[in-house]
Image: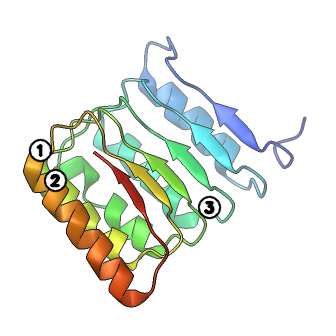
Amino acid sequence: MSRETLTHLTISNATIHDPRGIIYLIFTVMRGNKSITYLNISNNKISKGRDWELITYVIKENSTLTDLDISGNKFNFYEMKKMPNALKQNKTLLSLKLKNCSIDIQTFNNFSEALKVNNTLKYIDFSENNLGDAGKEIAQEIQHVRAEKGYHHLEVVL
């Protein structure tokens, strides 16, 4: 199968010693790929800032990806600052899973700004991130703003 016909790629719970190997593999496959729609890289111990920059690049630049699961990879606020901006520009992603990624309320609030303007995303999973009542309030605000703009419903899982 050539790189151009690959539509689904799952590299989850990999035992590669260096998570950068996973990122390099993904970046190599995604670069120039015009057909991949599903990418699951959950639970791979991806945590370095440069790794997250490459994932952000994929969100921003790939024009075919509709489903992305990066659950179970840990990061901090600083490493994650660029992803919401990439979501603002993305026009193809329908589902994004960020379950159990150590997302705090400040990071979720940054995502909320992107979710208010991205009209293609239909599902986003922030479960197991301890966002509590403050997260519920932010999710309600997202829905309110999207409804005012006439956008379709976005399922936000906390």
Q: Quadrant of residue 131?
A: top left
Q: Is residue 113 visible?
A: no
Viewer-nearest residue: 12 or 49: 12
User: Dividing the picture into quarters, in which one does residue 32 lie?
Assistant: bottom right
Tell me the element at label 1.
helix
Dot 3: element: loop
* Residue topped by disc 1: 132
User: In front of the other: label 3 or label 1?
Assistant: 1
Residue at image position (21%, 71%) is 141
Question: Which residue is painted at 53% across and 28% down in the image?
Answer: 22
Lateral position of residue 4 relative to residue 71, left or right: right
Quick one: which residue is furthest to the bottom in this view?
149
Q: Position of residue 41 (x, y in %)?
A: 52, 33
Quarter placement of the N terminus: top right
Up-down relation of residue 95 to residue 11 (above or below): below
Contact between marks 2 and 3 (CB within 8 A): the answer is no
Residue occupied by mark 3: 62
Give the alpha-carbon distance from disc 3 to disc 1, as whole Å. Answer: 33 Å
